[in-house]
Amino acid sequence: MQTQTLRPTEDGFATAADILTHGGLVAFPTETVYGLGGDARNGAAVAGIYAAKGRPSFNPLIVHVADLNMAQEFAQFDTTALALAAEFWPGPLTIVLPVRPDTSLSKLVTAGLTTVAIRVPAHPVARALLSKFGGPIAAPSANPSGGISPTRAAHVRDGLSDRIDAIINGGKCAVGLESTIVMPDDDGVHILRDGGITTEQIAAIVNVHDTIETSHDAPTSPGQLASHYAPNARLRMNALIAGDDEHMIGFGEISGQINLSSSGDLTQAAANLFAYLHMADEDAQTLGKTKIAVAPIPMHGLGIAINDRLKRASAARD
Ligand code: AMP
Ligand code: MG
């Protein structure tokens, strides 16, 4: 596809919003870095973000919204979160909160977790796009995986040209640092990642715990939640046929009770992955099966991230 460059005008925002509505990808400036945006309710769009970045794993993505009202459609706010939002939104603070049970967010955007990382950006271009689009935009930094975060439209073009539909050129980003990520609990917040809002600024509003929560898998990368989604049932990868005590998730021509993509489309498989793992887990329990078998997924493109996730789920209880 050819990547178009849009100007931050009424016309530009209308075109960008239209692309997002149809499941396309648009890079846009925020006050931190350029984000690569897709409709956070559309699993295929979110899978497209991972594909464009060439990410080898599914980290949950930050969901950008126009205002606190829109944030409350998707996440449950307690008094700590409300105090933080009142002080720092719009701005570079991301808050990790329980997902509302009736949410329309794609499960891929939260990587199957029951929490969502959400923020209201301050950049006028990001705000104009969000209000024109009228929905939540998932947006990690607009660079290929492993690359440097882009602070200008030209950086985005260098890294992602022809892999995304459009870039809104809104000049240089002011902060260049990523957003600070916090997770509230009963008596304060944990800082999951340092960024544009300092710990001192946050501590002036709420109690800050001095432990940094890190992931088991990546203790050096704060911003990762300690727990990640794993099914209750044991999981077996690269299965060609289900055993007696197995509920099977198929892919392509290898069928199962459900199929991640019967046409063998990896973007569709990625979009379905977390929802199908949840579904298979529930069905396995109902049917008295102890395991989930998953058909082989090819190791290229999004297949790498899908296999990475399945491997973690299958290793969870070893
Ligand atoms: P990026 O969008 O690339 O700036 O990075 C998003 C960061 O937010 C990653 O470090 C994620 O691990 C973190 N994140 C997103 N969602 C969650 C969540 N539900 N719980 C904890 N961390 C999260
Ligand atoms: Mg990044």
Image (spheres, rainbow, N blue to C red):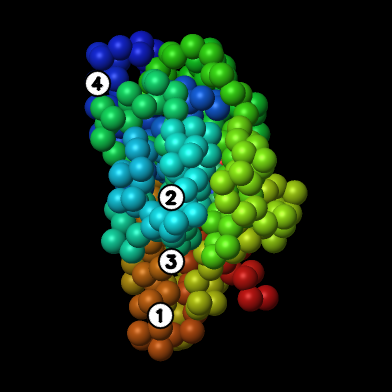
- Give how far apart the Cα atoms at labels 2 and 1 are: 39 Å
- Name the residue rendered at 58%, 57% in the picture: 188
Near mark 2 (Cα within 10 A), the count class, few <14, some 14-19 or many ≥20, is few
Q: Residues within 10 Å of mark 3 (few under 14, many from 20)?
A: many
Name the disc covering residue 284, or none.
1
Residue at left offset 48%, top offset 39%: 87
Judging by the rendered image, the residue that carries numbered circle 4 is 14
Q: From the viewer's side, name the closer residue of 261 and 198.
A: 198
Q: CA distance from mark 3 to mark 2?
A: 33 Å
**Amino acid type, mark 2:** Leu
User: For residue 119, which quarter of the picture?
Assistant: top left
Which tag, 1 or 3, sits closer to the chain's start? 3
The kind of secondary structure element at disc 4 is: helix
Q: Quadrant of the C terminus?
A: bottom right
Rendered location of residue 76, percent (x, y): 39, 57
Task: Work out whether 307 lies above or below 136.
Answer: below
- Classify residue 159 by image quadrant: top right
Marks 1/4: CA distance? 45 Å
Vertical comparison of 102 with 236: above or below: above
Neighbor class of circle 4 (other Cα within 10 Å; few <14, some 14-19, many 20+) is some
Mark 3: secondary structure:
helix
Q: Position of residue 165 (x, y in %)?
A: 37, 24
Q: Which mark is residue 82?
A: 2
Give the mark nearer the N terminus: 3 vs 4.
4
